[in-house]
Image (cartoon, grey):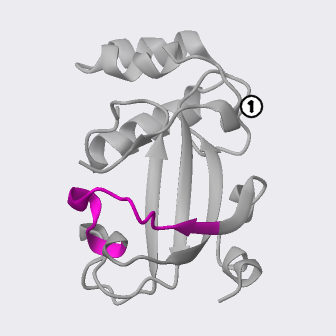
């Protein structure tokens, strides 16, 4: 599949910051990292994109919020990472986040917090009032203390354990 065709199947609001390229296995990769798709020395086509959280296209990218970086790796054959095992896909998704700890611990928390941030995103006083009523308020407010840096100069952390 060509990259431009792959984009047609994605949310068009997320395509503003994408880039196409290649990623490669380095011959000097340490033995403990030679697993899954990286067990084979080769090069793969990738489609990458930056994102801001939450993914509401109406939010300004210039406010301090966690940023994301995602890679869709094409032409992956053989063993996949755990999340892709058994799906028989020729792609592998690799995702990163600019904060070292994820504040969205499970599906229920994710839904609650994203709903609050979208509903009260333009009213921080009301959002904080809602977050103060939660047991995880400190964790949920931590994202507002991240440095405000340009998407391309933000350090990223793997979202895998």
Q: Is residue 133 visible?
A: no
* Quarter of the image where one finds residue 48: bottom right
* Quarter of the image where one finds residue 147: top right
Residue drawn at x 62%, y 21% as measured from the top left: 64
Residue drawn at x 71%, y 74% as measured from the top left: 7
x, y percent for residue 128: 46, 13
Task: Judge by depth and name the residue closer to the eye, 104 or 129.
Answer: 104
In the displayed structure image, the side of residue 15 where residue 142 appears, left or right: left
Magenta region: 22-37
**Circle 1 sits on which residue?**
60
Q: State the quadrant of the N terminus.
A: bottom right
Task: Judge by depth and name the residue closer to the eye, 117 or 105.
Answer: 105
Residue drawn at x 43%, y 30% as measured from the top left: 99
Residue drawn at x 65%, y 78% as measured from the top left: 9
Rate crowding at label 1 as few (under 14), some (14 to 19) or many (20 or more) other CA atoms within 10 Å.
few
Task: Judge by depth and name the residue closer to the eye, 139 or 36.
Answer: 36
Task: Give the SS element for disc 1.
Answer: loop
- Whether 91 is among the magenta residues is no
- Whether 27 is among the magenta residues is yes
x, y percent for residue 127: 50, 19
In the displayed structure image, the side of residue 61 where residue 48 appears, left or right: left
Residue that sits furthest to the front in the current view: 28
Task: State whether residue 83 is above or below residue 61.
Answer: below
x, y percent for residue 21: 68, 67
């Amino acid at each position: 599949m060509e990259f431009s065709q792959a984009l047609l199947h994605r949310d068009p609001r997320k395509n503003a910051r994408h880039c196409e390229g290649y990623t490669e296995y380095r011959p000097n990769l340490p033995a403990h990292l030679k697993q899954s798709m990286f067990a084979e020395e080769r090069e793969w086509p990738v489609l990458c994109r930056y994102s801001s959280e939450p993914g509401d296209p109406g939010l300004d990218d210039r406010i301090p919020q966690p940023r994301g970086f995602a890679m869709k790796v094409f032409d992956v054959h053989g063993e996949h990472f755990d999340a892709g095992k058994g799906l028989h896909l020729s792609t592998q998704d690799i995702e990163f986040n600019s904060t070292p700890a994820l504040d969205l611990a499970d599906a229920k928390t994710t839904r609650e917090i994203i709903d609050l941030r979208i509903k009260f995103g333009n009213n921080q006083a009301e959002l904080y009032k809602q977050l103060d009523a939660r047991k995880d308020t400190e964790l949920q407010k931590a994202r507002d203390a991240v440095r405000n840096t340009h998407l391309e100069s933000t350090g990223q952390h793997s979202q895998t354990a």
